[in-house]
């Protein structure tokens, strides 16, 4: 992975993510998803992003609505679900004229929100070799960065960010189930101090 001109280094965005995602168990899933979405849009220089977590018990993807508070289940006919199912990175270069994009849940959401998507990058995330945990999507690359197109470097960054987000949110979920003293031990072990 080589850095593109003007792009944050991998070290800087890993550090930023580690400092922002709350592993203490005190933040809600919605708060951590909103933070992850902010980091993805900042690092990839895109208009919007979506970070979806897989709920193992139901095999459903859970995402955060645009209000940054409401969680919802992603439709089964989404590009995100397809990327996860097929373990494949999906690049949509011209969303307005892409039949697959327009037929998927993402296209329907664009119509409902009256917004235009130029391009999209959908990356499945795996923390273990065979275990899918999340899908991360980035929409509308900044027109002044790489000609408004997502690069292979963006794909690598998105995959890494997705893995870090998933791992941190998994830790937050585990921490939330522990007694307070054990939460402090867990937080200290991972180099973070929580009140």
Image (cartoon, helix red, strand yellow):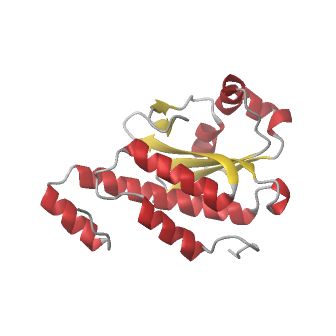
Tell me: 60 left or right of 90: left
Looking at the rendered image, the quarter that the N terminus falls into is: bottom right
- 149 vs 77: above or below: below
Q: Where residue 118 sits in the image (x, y, percent)? A: 80, 42
Tell me: 192 left or right of 94: left
For the view shown, which residue lies furthest in the top direction?
Answer: 112
Q: Tell me what residue is drawn at x 64 percent, y 45 percent.
A: 48
Q: Where residue 30 sits in the image (x, y, percent)? A: 42, 42
The total number of labels drawn is: 0
Q: Is residue 132 visible?
A: no
Residue 24 picture quarter:
bottom left
Q: Where residue 142 sits in the image (x, y, percent)? A: 76, 54
- Camera-side residue of 191 and 124: 191
- 75 vs 188: above or below: above
Q: Where residue 193 sits in the image (x, y, percent)? A: 28, 69
Q: Tell me what residue is drawn at x 23 percent, y 62 percent.
A: 195
- 86 vs 66: above or below: below
- Camera-side residue of 28 and 108: 28
Tell me: 51 left or right of 143: left
Q: Is residue 188 visible?
A: yes
Q: Tell me what residue is drawn at x 73 percent, y 27 percent.
A: 103
- Camera-side residue of 183 and 103: 183
Q: Tell me what residue is drawn at x 32 percent, y 54 percent.
A: 172
Tell me: 39 left or right of 98: left
């Amino acid at each position: 992975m080589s850095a593109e001109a003007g792009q944050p280094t991998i070290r800087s965005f890993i550090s930023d993510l580690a400092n922002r995602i709350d592993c203490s168990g005190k933040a809600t899933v919605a708060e951590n998803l909103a933070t992850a979405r902010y980091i993805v849009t900042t690092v990839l220089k895109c208009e919007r992003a979506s970070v979806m977590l897989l709920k193992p018990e139901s095999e459903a993807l859970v995402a955060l609505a645009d209000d940054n508070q409401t969680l919802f289940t992603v439709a089964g006919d989404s590009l995100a679900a397809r990327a996860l199912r097929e373990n494949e990175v999906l690049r949509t270069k011209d969303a307005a004229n892409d039949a697959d994009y327009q037929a998927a849940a993402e296209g329907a959401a664009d119509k409902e929100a009256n917004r235009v998507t130029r391009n999209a990058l959908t990356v499945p995330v795996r923390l273990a070799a065979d275990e899918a945990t999340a899908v991360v999507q980035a929409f509308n690359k900044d027109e002044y960065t790489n000609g408004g197109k997502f690069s292979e470097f963006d794909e690598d960054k998105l995959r890494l960010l997705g893995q870090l987000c998933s791992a941190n949110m998994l830790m937050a979920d585990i921490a939330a189930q522990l007694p307070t003293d054990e939460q402090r031990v867990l937080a200290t072990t991972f180099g973070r101090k929580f009140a």
